[in-house]
Image (cartoon, rainbow, N blue to C red):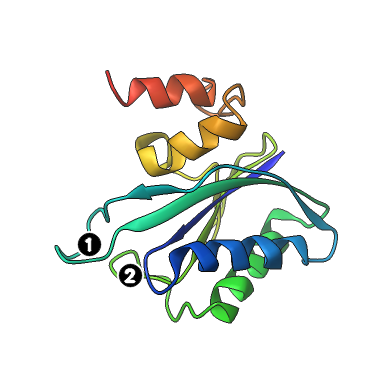
Amino acid sequence: MIYLSLGSNLGDRNQNIDSALKALDNVINTKVIASSSKHETKAIDLPEKTPDFLNAVVEIESSLSPVDLLEETKAIEIKLGRTQKNLQTPRTIDIDILFYNDKIILEDNLTIPHPLLHERYFVLAPLNEIAPDFMHPILEQPVSDLLNDLWV
């Protein structure tokens, strides 16, 4: 089970996420299995008047390696108008790999599980919709518990 987060806060956010889903489904040897509803959240750690984000999480199946999947997600971001991968800027689309089965990957350009997912409501809430029982391979807690822990 591979889980990706999608976020957009520029342009037609809903269409940006839908376009990213369609593009993911068109990646060779990759298929979208499930998608959460879209969640609107305030921009975090961005300038005050930054537009709100629309976020979703998808489950995909893919025979691509994690690194190849990362390259495909970067290509989709560029195709949909993302000009830079900088956390301090608004974006048409942001695609992050949250989990790739139960793999733990610590490389210069790729960290799986995503290192901040357990701290982010905008990731955990939609992820909990489609995978509440998925176990974080490092924290050894299901997604539902990680979400509940944010409120403690």
Instruction: Report helix, strand or loop for mark 2.
Output: loop
Q: Amino acid at mark 2?
A: Pro
Residue 119 vertical position relative to residue 98 in the rendered view, above or below: above
**In the foreground, 58 or 104:** 58
Residue 140 % position (x, y)? 54, 21
**Residue 73 appears left or right of 87:** right
Q: Amino acid at mark 1?
A: Leu
**Residue 10 appears left or right of 108:** left
Residue 96 % position (x, y)? 53, 55
Of the numbered discs 2 and 1, the one sitting upstream in the chain is 1
Q: Which residue in the structure is indicated by mark 1?
A: 46
Q: Which residue in the structure is indicated by mark 2?
A: 90
Residue 5 circle label: none
**In the foreground, 30 or 69:** 30
Quadrant occupied by the N terminus = top right
Residue found at x 30% / y 58%: 52
**Crowdedness of circle 2 by 10 Å Cα count: few (<14), some, many (20+)?**
many
Instruction: Report helix, strand or loop for mark 1.
Output: loop
Residue found at x 32% / y 26%: 150
Residue 69 % position (x, y)? 69, 60
CB under 8 Å between discs 2 and 1: yes
**Crowdedness of circle 1 by 10 Å Cα count: few (<14), some, many (20+)?**
few
Quadrant occupied by the C terminus = top left
- The total number of labels drawn is 2
Residue 5 % position (x, y)? 53, 50
Q: Quadrant of residue 11?
A: bottom left
What is the C-alpha distance between the residues marked 2 and 1?
Answer: 8 Å
Residue 8 vertical position relative to residue 152 in the rendered view, above or below: below
